Image (cartoon, helix red, strand yellow):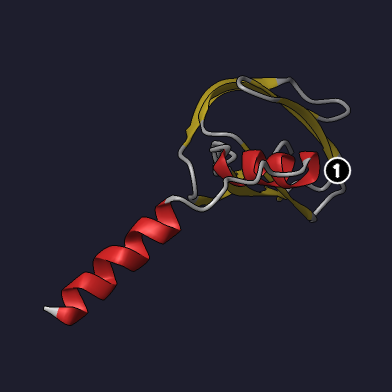
Amino acid sequence: MRLLFLLAASSFLVSCAPHVAPTPEQAAARAAIDTVKPLPPIKALITVRNLSERDIMVGVRGPETQMISIPMKAKRTISLPPGTYKWAATAEKTETQVGNKAFEAGQQYVWDFNLD
C-alpha cells in the first residue's frame, strides 16, 4: 500500500513539473526527426555492351533521358529509374536501330548492341 502511495505521489509530482519550451534549435531538430522523407526510387543497373567493330551512340528516353557513347568492343554501366524507354542506337555508316525496352527497379541487365 505504501509503495502504491509513493508511485501515485511521484506520478503527480512529475506531471506537475513545469514544461520548458524547446529552443529553436531543439524544435528544428525535432521537426527533422519527425519528418518522413520518401526513399529515392531504386534504379535498374544496366551494362550496355558494344559488340561492334566501331564506336556507337545509344540514346534512351523515358522517365529519364541519357545519351551514351561506347567505344568499339567496350561497355558502359548506367543506372535508370524503372519504366519503359524508347531507344536508338547508331554508328557511322550504319542504319539507326530503334526500339522500346522496359527496366524494373533494383534489377541488373546486360544490353548488347552489334551495329556492324
Residue under the point 73% across and 39% down: 28
The C terminus sits in image quarter? top right
Residue at the image point whose x is 64% and y is 38% from the top? 31
Q: Position of residue 33 (x, y in %)?
A: 60, 47
Is residue 27 depicted above or below 99 in this figure? below
Which corner quadrant of the image does residue 44 belong to? Answer: top right
Q: Quadrant of residue 10?
A: bottom left
Residue nearest the observer in this picture, 50 or 103: 103
The image shows residue 62, relative to residue 82, as above or below, that is above
Viewed as shown, does residue 56 lie left or right of 4? right
- The correct choice, above or below, for 112 with respect to 85 in the image is below
**Residue 75 locus on image (x, y percent):** 76, 54
Q: For this view, does 59 lie left or right of residue 92?
A: left
Residue 8 shows in this picture = yes
x and y percentages locating residue 29 in the rendered image: 70, 46
Residue 1 placement: quadrant: bottom left
SS of the residue under disc 1: loop
Quick check: 115 above or below 6?
A: above
Residue 15 in percent (x, y) is at 41, 52
Residue nearest the observer in this picture, 25 or 114: 25
Name the residue carrying label 1: 54
- Dot 1 alpha-carbon crowd within 10 angstroms: few under 14, some 14 to 19, many 20 or more: some
Q: Amino acid at mark 1?
A: Arg
Task: Tell me what residue is drawn at x 45 percent, y 39 percent.
Answer: 104
